[in-house]
Amino acid sequence: MERYLQEFDPLPSTALPSMHTRLTIEMVSMNGLIVLNFIQYFPEMEYFSNFARQLRENDINYNVLRQEKALYPLIEMPGE
């Protein structure tokens, strides 16, 4: 199926808003590419910036395809 896929954007349950899971990085290999979803629920960009810096320092080319603000409320669910 890989040759028929152009984009893959899953939302794992660990990426849903939570007081306990504030950063999720999901990696998917598809069609010869590695796609990373960097999902965070805090405004500081230091984790992403440092990750991108390390890629550059190791001559790993990358493209940032999309950056969006999370539109989920940060709440603690019952039982967490």
Image: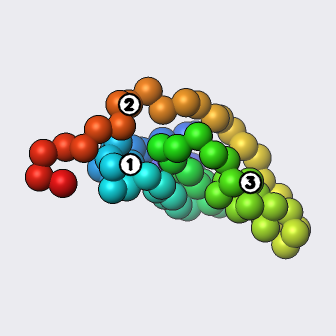
Residue 17, compared with residue 28, is above or below; it is above
| Quadrant of the rendering where the C terminus is positioned | bottom left
**Residue at image mark 2:** 72
Residue drawn at 56 percent across, 51 percent down: 38
- For the question of whether residue 8 can be seen, the reply is no
**Residue at image mark 3:** 49
Question: Callout 1: helix, strand or loop?
Answer: helix
Question: Callout 2: helix, strand or loop?
Answer: loop
Depth check, front residue: 51 or 77: 77
Q: Residue 26: give x, y in percent of width and height.
A: 49, 58
Kind of residue at disc 2: Tyr
Mark 1 neighbour density, 10 Å: few (under 14) some (14–19) many (20 or more): some
Depth check, front residue: 9 or 40: 40
Mark 3 neighbour density, 10 Å: few (under 14) some (14–19) many (20 or more): few
Measure how far apart labels 2 and 3 are at the Cα level: 23 Å
Q: Residue 31: give x, y in percent of width and height.
A: 60, 55
Residue drawn at 87 percent across, 69 percent down: 57
